[in-house]
Amino acid sequence: MPAYPRPSNADSLWAKLFALPTGCLRLVSRLREAGHRTWWCGGTVRDLVRGSVPRDLDLATDALPEAVRAAVPGAWLAENQPGESLGTLMLEVEGRSVEVTTLRRDGAYVEGRAPSEVEFVLDPAEDWQRRDFTMNALYLDPATGDLVDPSGGMQDLWAHRLRVIGPARERLREDPLRILRALRLCAEHGLVMDRATWRAVVDCAGEVARLSRERLRLELERLLIARGRARGLQLLLRSGVAHHVLPWLPPLAEVPQPEDHHPEGAVLGHTAQVLGNLRDPPTAALAWAALFHDVGKKETFVQEGGRIRFPGHDVLSARFAEQWLFEHGATAALRREVVALIEQHIRITCVPSFRPMKRARFLQSSLFAAHLEFHRADCLACHRKLDLWRELRRLADSLPPPPREHLVRGKDLLDLGWPPGPALGAALDAIEEARLAGSVVSREDALGLALKLRGSTEDRAPKTR
């Protein structure tokens, strides 16, 4: 397969290769010195062509996996190598993951995930047909800068077009994850599917039910945090895929909201706007919270005297999110954060009226920045009033920095003669509130207040005969 002429931006494209981590350049050199050819490929070349920093580092080579192992330092090899039988090795190079795959032809797919067998080959001309989309079948020779483009991927990239390689329905059914990947790539890169690809996505939408729940969640998560994620959600709905992966989502289009507070209309439209309003790049927890935060409104919908309410929808939405994420393999840490964001998205309006210590705990919690960002996105998707958002920022900025360690502890009060019990805990709370108010700034201040509180407690104690 002859190399295609270098595109007009080839010099800058080639130059960008040298901006990759130096370990990646050494990796290419080691394989070349061992007599093997290499090409940067897939998302690496796609992102370079589009002028962005590659998130994925994919290297194709004619070296067999055992030859790659022999050519690179053992410290670069990841401990777990589940794809080695298919010719893929995962390397950790200067803090970046690099996927090195031997050129190959794929056999039939088993259970919609991986080919039953592979045949290793020596040239991209025999490798490209196994890839999913033309924009991912680009091969850039790091030694010469020549671009191998056997499928017309460059033309599709310049046309902002996503096109499946080969018979679209057949290729999507091989691995249904490609259906979700197509939607994500369109959202993330502002692409439009060609007619055959879109028709195949719509016709094969039900195939996503064959995916494992964890694979499904991970690819949905990539879509939800991608640039253009609001459009990605629309594509999920328009294609019919959402009916199979998030069946509770489409019915939210039929749940009305009070017009005075939600001029944007039904719950589904509000959900899409909240997701889109999150600052780039949102965390996975923020994205999932945006998707789930109002799902409980369908079950809690109440209309009385012309007024629409959703009593308890925040709690119900949080429970639903926790269960769905648990069933789809999310970590406990992710579930806790999503649940906290959803449970507090209504209660956050009460924070300014909290007692000082309770308010400070919220404002200085590890999740406060996420709560604040979610509140901003939520408000911009309905009434667009950010008064509370500004007030919360002001309150947080006005707090003294938390001490590296407590000014006093329970043991200190016991040493001053405090008896164990509820009164001791109340005294510690009073000292912390005084610190937040600024009247206690040192350990000496705290101990002095403890003595005063101890004296007043003794004065109030009933006298015994």
Image (cartoon, rainbow, N blue to C red):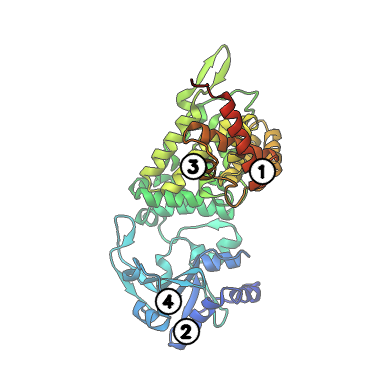
Q: Is residue 166 left or right of residue 229?
A: left
Q: Amino acid at mark 3?
A: Val
Residues at marks 2 and 1, CA–CA distance in whole angstroms: 65 Å
Badge 4 is on which residue? 75
Mark 1: secondary structure = helix
Residues at marks 4 and 3, CA–CA distance in whole angstroms: 36 Å
Residues at marks 2 and 4, CA–CA distance in whole angstroms: 14 Å
Local packing at callout 4 (Cα closer than 10 Å; few below 14, some 14-19, many 20+) is few
Instruction: Give the residue drawn at x 54%, y 52%.
Output: 186
Comparing labels 3 and 1, the label whose residue is closer to the camera: 1
Q: Amino acid at mark 1?
A: Asp
Tell which circle, 4 or 3, labels the residue nearer the N-terminal end.
4
Tell which circle, 3 or 1, labels the residue nearer the N-terminal end.
3
Local packing at callout 1 (Cα closer than 10 Å; few below 14, some 14-19, many 20+) is some
Residues at marks 3 and 1, CA–CA distance in whole angstroms: 39 Å
Of residues 55 and 318, the one nearer the viewer is 318
Badge 3 is on which residue? 338
Instruction: Give the residue drawn at x 60%, y 35%.
Output: 430
Task: Point out which mark residue 356 bears.
Answer: none
Comparing labels 3 and 2, the label whose residue is closer to the camera: 3
Q: Is residue 386 left or right of residue 314?
A: right
Tell which circle, 2 or 4, labels the residue nearer the N-terminal end.
2
Mark 2: secondary structure = helix
Of residues 436 and 420, the one nearer the viewer is 420
Q: Amino acid at mark 2?
A: Arg
Comparing labels 2 and 1, the label whose residue is closer to the camera: 1
Q: Is residue 167 left or right of residue 152?
A: left
Badge 1 is on which residue? 445
Badge 2 is on which residue? 30
Q: Quick check: can you spot residue 265?
A: no
